[in-house]
Image: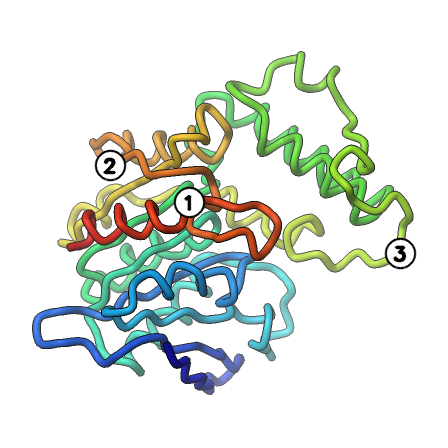
Amino acid sequence: MGVDTHTLHLPDADIVYDVHGPDPEPGRRTLVAVGQPMDATGFRALAARLPDRRVVAYDPRGLGRSTRRDGRADYDPPTLAADVHALITAIGGPVDVFASSGGAVTALALVATHPGDVAVLVAHEPPAIAVLPDADAARRGWAQAERAYTEGGFGAGMAEFIRYTSWSGEFTADYVTAGPADPAAFGLPTDDDGSRDDPLLSGCSTAVIEYVPDPVALAAAGTRIVLAAGVESGDTVTARAARGVAALLGQEAAVFPSHHGGFADGEFGWAGAPDEFAAELRRVVG
């Protein structure tokens, strides 16, 4: 299946996006895949399993091949949503959206601010920790990962991030006493290369995890919104957040195959169940 790559030039950013598959048949919408901080490469396995759909995946501003000229380093959901709105305007909408992790937060902001853009949104495990009953404790856990990164570099920070995202249930005192995580246990580097610009661990993603969806705006949008969590995700923080956002919208979260990255095929080291995931996404989106 061929891939065409394009660049959308905005006043303060250049957004690079890939187009997989054929032009949509009459009555069938383009599927836009939204990640954060994951770029378009993370959706290649999913696009390959939807060969009859036009799938568009992009690199968010400042990530992958996309650049930014806004003088900022943070990832602000309304700004990211405006980029997706510009992309949809360029390719033609309305579209269906599959959005993963921080991308699901972007997509919820998109639907709230540009309700005519999206017909169906599947928001898979948004890390919207502000909706959790233990939000303050979840923030402290996130801050531990950021602090580990600041003090020890990528390996130390990512080890704490993995511990954080793998923890089951609320963040109790047991979570604090169980740390810190050992980078070597996850095959991560134990040396510090001195860099502190990781988009996930450097503090640039705080606005993503603190974003609270607007249930009134989302209800008024007319978009069919499906919150989803992986069956293997259990009571991890992103699965709990998905269920929390679903409750905010008066619904229950759908259960999808596999885990947080269940649509991936192992290309990035954490194999999901992309065949089953794509089949379920096709069933839900229609």
Residue 160 image point, x, y percent: 72, 35
Q: Which residue is mark 1?
A: 273
First reached walking from the N terminus: tag 3 or tag 2: 3
Three-letter code for the amino acid on which mark 3 is drawn: Asp
Along the line of sight, the residue nearer the viewer: 121 or 47 = 47
Q: Which residue is mark 2?
A: 249
Q: Nearer the viewer, mark 1 or mark 2?
A: 1
Q: Which mark is residue 193?
A: 3
First reached walking from the N terminus: tag 1 or tag 2: 2
Can you say whether 15 is above or below 265 in the image? Answer: below
Residue under the image location 35 percent in, 44 percent down: 213
Residue 148 image point, x, y percent: 79, 38
Residue under the image location 75 percent in, 42 percent down: 157
Residue 47 image point, x, y percent: 37, 65
Along the line of sight, the residue nearer the viewer: 163 or 198 = 163
Q: CA distance from mark 3 to mark 1?
A: 34 Å
Residue under the image location 48 percent in, 67 percent down: 40
Q: Quadrant of residue 144?
A: top right
Can you say whether 45 is above or below 52 in the image? Answer: above
